[in-house]
Amino acid sequence: MTGTAARGSTAAILAITGLAPLVWGTTYAVTSEFLPPERPMFTALMRALPAGLVLLGATRVLPRGRWIGRAALLGVLNIGAFFPLLFLAAYRLPGGVAAVLGSAAPLFALGFAAVLLRVRPSGRKLTAGAIGMLGVALVVLRANAALDTIGVLAGLAGAVSMAAGTVLTGHWGRPEGVGPLAFTSWQLTAGGVVLLPLALLTEGAPPALDLPAIGGYLYLGVLGTAAAYALWFRGLARVPATSVAFLGLLSPLSAAVIGWLALGQSLTPLQVLGMAIALGGTVLGQVGDRAQPPSERPEPLSPSVTDAPELADPRQLSSIEE
């Protein structure tokens, strides 16, 4: 593949993968307008488990061998642990503070790549991470933002969880012959199984749902979770995880634009500047990376086959989401 063709291929993959955080940015509007209030864990459960089970039934592919443990770990990191930490931060912190903490995920991803994969972060990527955080801060942070120790720790832990899941997902790839939908189903189901007892213990029985709520959960489950995560994991199989992680900065930007267009929220010139800065950090984080050749991506499902290299408020969710 020529250099120009490789760059074009990488740009196309990143553009498609970037649709995932853009869709995640719609979570704020959907949750605030259609879903029952004060049920963050139930909302997280409804996003993950039904979609995971439907995809699992449709693809009829189960993990085998060491992929049982890998799928469970990735499901916990990307879904089962990330969602509760996300909600805890969102409830205990202003949405802007939580969003800034979440925007540290690309920097954590660079750290995990350095420790786990021996990939030394470049000065360009470190700069891109700092620029991205600054841009997000200008978009969502308010002067009266208050700090809460537990909330800050939860926000940072959520960013760490998502970063670790992103790096490991990109490093391990997918088993040979397993498509993005089946791979997504494993993680959503594993994460949903973790969320089920948490939701029951913290919030009790499910609330009564009206038609708007049912429609909202269907949207979040089908588009906001199943389709979006399939695109996300597909991108991680083709582009370095340290690049894909920067696309997560698009989520709070998408939430701000949708809030302005659909919910009548204000959008100041400083916020517009912050969007431009965050987008600049996102682009800078991609410069110089190429799509991985096919031989580096899939890994056989069976361990008997020669293996490839290893690898808050719910209404504020989209502000800090992956």
Image (cartoon, helix red, strand yellow):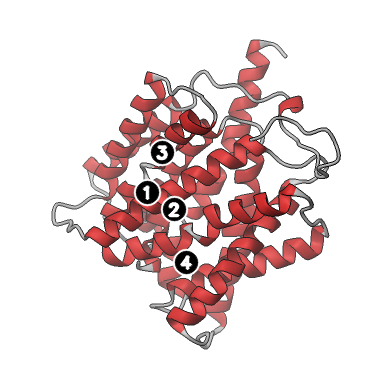
**Residue 30: image tag:** 4
In the rendered view, would you say 290 is above or below 85? above
User: Which residue matches tag 3?
Assistant: 108
Nearest to the observer: residue 283 or residue 106: 106
Ranked by sequence position, the earlier of labels 1 and 4 is 4
**Residue 167, horizontal then vertical, whole percent:** 54, 38
Disc 1 residue crowd, few under 14, some 14–19, many 20+, Cα 10 Å: many
User: Which quadrant of the structure image shows residue 155?
Assistant: bottom left
Contact flag, marks 3 and 1 (Cβ < 8 Å)? no
Q: CA distance from mark 3 to mark 1?
A: 10 Å
Ranked by sequence position, the earlier of labels 2 and 4 is 4
Disc 2 residue crowd, few under 14, some 14–19, many 20+, Cα 10 Å: many
Contact flag, marks 2 and 1 (Cβ < 8 Å)? yes
Front of the two marks 2 and 3: 3
Ranked by sequence position, the earlier of labels 2 and 3 is 3
Contact flag, marks 1 and 4 (Cβ < 8 Å)? no
Q: Is 178 left, or right, of 148 in this rendering?
A: right
**Residue 21, horizontal then vertical, whole percent:** 50, 47
User: Which residue matches tag 2?
Assistant: 321
**Disc 4 residue type (three-letter):** Val
Q: Outermost residue, left direction?
A: 144
**Disc 3 residue type (three-letter):** Phe
**Disc 2 residue type (three-letter):** Glu
Q: Outermost residue, right direction?
A: 304
Q: CA distance from mark 4 to mark 3?
A: 29 Å
**Residue 37, horizontal then vertical, whole percent:** 40, 78
Element type at marker 3?
helix
Ranked by sequence position, the earlier of labels 2 and 1 is 1
Ranked by sequence position, the earlier of labels 4 and 3 is 4
Nearest to the observer: residue 257 or residue 56: 56
